[in-house]
Image (cartoon, grey):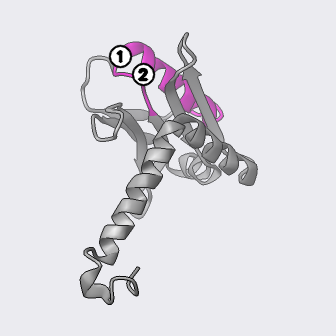
Amino acid sequence: MVDQAEGYVNVGFRGKDLYNKLDATRREIMFEGDTRAALACLNGKGDRDQRFFCKFSADEENCLCNLFWRDSTTLIKYGCFGDVFLFDNTYNTNCYEKPLVLFVGCSNHLTSVVFGCALLMDENIKSYTWVLGTFLSSMDGKKPKSVLANGDQAM
């Protein structure tokens, strides 16, 4: 293309413009099958990690509602540092405007440790009950001594 335009100056766009266009096209393709792609990615992680845990729920139309995952490293860290964890969510920060729930603790070195992640359909008691039950079952039933939350009534 540079040769056809007789130099970079005459092309009309920069390398970054080309990168952005290719990335946008790739994202369009991915969003068509995003649920399938996410589950395939998580299944791939499960193939490589024997203690990887992933669970999801679907509605009556077979659409993904809730998704939880954690790997073997987070299981080990929860065994060491899981006496207390923060149960919090961020809302409307992803393209689906769904709550992202993080289970976060603190190590002996005062660094943050993520124990698990979940995408939820909404912020209601049913969703939080599902994710907390799923979290505990993924951690072999080990319950924390304390849980910190942001004070949301549904939590």
Q: CA distance from mark 2 to mark 1?
A: 6 Å
**Near-viewer residue (1 or 140):** 1
Check disc 1 and report its element: helix, strand or loop. Answer: loop
Coordinates of residue 58 in the picture (x, y in percent): 56, 19
Q: Which residues are magenta?
A: 119-142
Residue 92 in view of the camera: yes
Q: Nearer the viewer, residue 139 or 64?
A: 64
Identify the image quadrant of residue 60.
top right
State yes or no: residue 125 in magenta.
Answer: yes
In the image, 112 versus 126, the foreground residue is: 126
Residue closest to the eye, 64 or 86: 64
Amino acid found under the numbered disc labelled 2: Tyr
Q: Residue at x 42, y 61 (%)?
A: 22
Q: Residue at x 38, y 37 (%)?
A: 100
The residue that appears at 49% across and 46% down in the rendered structure is: 29
Residue 69 picture quarter: top right
* Quarter containing the C terminus: top left
Q: Position of residue 130 (x, y in %)?
A: 50, 20
Residue corresponding to mark 2: 128
Give the residue at mark 1: 124
* Residue 11 x %, y %: 29, 79
Image height of 32 relative to 78, above or below:
above
- Helix, strand or loop under label 2: helix
Residue at 68%, 43% (x, y): give it. Answer: 43
Indicate left or right for 44 with 86 as reference.
right
Looking at the rendering, which quadrant does residue 39 occupy?
top right
Q: Residue 119 appears at what percent x and percent y?
A: 44, 33
Q: CB atoms at circles 2 and 1 under 8 Å apart?
A: yes
Q: In this view of the protein, can residue 82 be seen by the observer?
A: no
